[in-house]
Amino acid sequence: MQVRYSDMDMLGHANNAIYLTYLESARLAYFREVNRQTWDEIALVLAHADMDFKIPLIPGIQPVVRMRTIRFGRSSMTIENIITDEGSERLFYTASTVLVAINPKTGRPVPIPDSEKQKVIAYEPALD
């Protein structure tokens, strides 16, 4: 990620709302790598985010977003997220996010396909 001038608030650090944008960008890359495709039949939507801001992000810091899936439900998955500085490994932010699988046509929750769960488990063996 890159902290951009437009990410800043009036105090000179990344606005709290931009952290969810950083997570969204990282999540897209994560699913491209884990699943190696986009999910066409279902969409994953952010249903819950529990966030802790540790140290403000300021220009000049190169934040790194790390994430891992820690739990599957029937139609949901929980992901742990952290933002660090690649150089010093300072912890700037932690979050737990819950994504829910929905049918894009109806907007209703649907089960996450076992085939997709297995791809995540293969990528993250500790999840099994």
Image: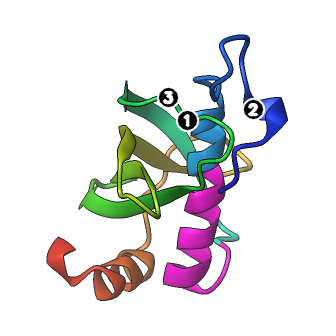
Residue with the mark numbered 3: 56
- Kindly identify the residue that appears in the image at 66 percent across and 41 percent down: 21
User: Helix or strand or loop: what does disc 1 sit on?
Assistant: loop
Q: Which mark is residue 7?
A: 2
How far apart marks 3 and 2 lie (CA) works out to 12 Å
Give the residues drawn in magenta, as a range.
24-38
Nearer to me, 34 or 73? 34
- Residue 57 image label: 1
The residue at 66%/47% (across/down) is 60
Residue at 49%, 81% in the rendered image: 34
Q: Based on the displayed image, in which of its 4 quarters is residue 115 positioned?
A: bottom left
Check the image and report above or below for 56 versus 114: above
Expressed as whole percent of the image width and height from the top left, the position of residue 96 reads 34, 41
The residue most toward the top is: 10
Q: Is residue 26 magenta?
A: yes
Q: Amino acid at mark 2?
A: Asp
Q: Are marks 3 and 1 in contact (CB under 8 Å)?
A: yes
